[in-house]
Image: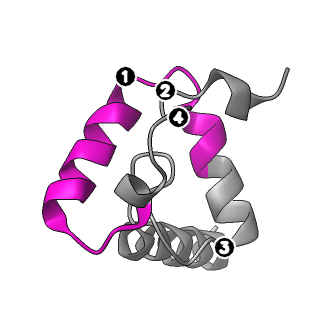
């Protein structure tokens, strides 16, 4: 069984996670907060550099910042 089959968003219309709406974004993030596989989802999105939607409780801009912070940390470690 993969992490996707355990996701809290399973069965929720995908438009909620990709719509360009702050209302939908808030609702999607609330679903992510109660998800047991949110870490796996975020790891996946960061690995494939997903450019759209809510993944692992973060939007694309937030994930991009996270990746940038990781690169800076690696440089300074």
Residue at the spot 65% in from the left edge and 21% down from the top edge: 6
Numbered label attached to residue 68: none
Is 64 within the magenta? no
Local packing at callout 3 (Cα closer than 10 Å; few below 14, some 14-19, many 20+) is few
Q: Is residue 43 above or below residue 51?
A: above
Numbered label attached to residue 49: 3
Q: Tell me whether circle 2 and circle 1 mark residues in contact (CB < 8 Å).
A: yes
Q: Look at discs 3 and 1 and give the one toward the viewer.
A: 1
Residue at the spot 41% in from the left edge and 56% down from the top edge: 17
Local packing at callout 2 (Cα closer than 10 Å; few below 14, some 14-19, many 20+) is some
Q: Is residue 27 above or below residue 64?
A: above
Residue at the spot 32% in from the left edge and 46% down from the top edge: 28
Numbered label attached to residue 38: 4
Q: Look at discs 3 and 2 and give the one toward the viewer.
A: 2
According to the picture, the residue beneath numbered tag 1 turns out to be 34
In space, the residues marked 3 and 2 are separated at their CA atoms by 21 Å
The quadrant of the picture occupied by the N terminus is top right
Q: Tell me whether circle 2 and circle 4 mark residues in contact (CB < 8 Å).
A: no
Secondary-structure class at tag 4: helix
According to the picture, the residue beneath numbered tag 2 turns out to be 8
Which contiguous range is marked in magenta? Answer: 18-42
Taking the image as shown, residue 60 lies to the left or right of residue 6, namely left
Q: For this rendering, which residue is in front, 29 or 14?
A: 14
Local packing at callout 4 (Cα closer than 10 Å; few below 14, some 14-19, many 20+) is many
The quadrant of the picture occupied by the C terminus is bottom right
Is 28 within the magenta? yes
Q: Is residue 56 above or below residue 10?
A: below
In space, the residues marked 2 and 1 are separated at their CA atoms by 7 Å
């Amino acid at each position: 069984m993969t992490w996707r089959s355990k996701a809290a968003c399973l069965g929720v219309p995908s438009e909620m996670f990709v719509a360009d709406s702050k209302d939908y974004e808030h609702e999607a993030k609330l679903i992510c907060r109660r998800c047991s596989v949110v870490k796996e989802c975020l790891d996946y999105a960061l690995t494939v550099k997903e450019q759209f939607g809510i993944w692992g409780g973060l939007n694309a801009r937030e994930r991009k910042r996270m990746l940038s912070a990781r690169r800076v940390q690696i440089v300074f470690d």
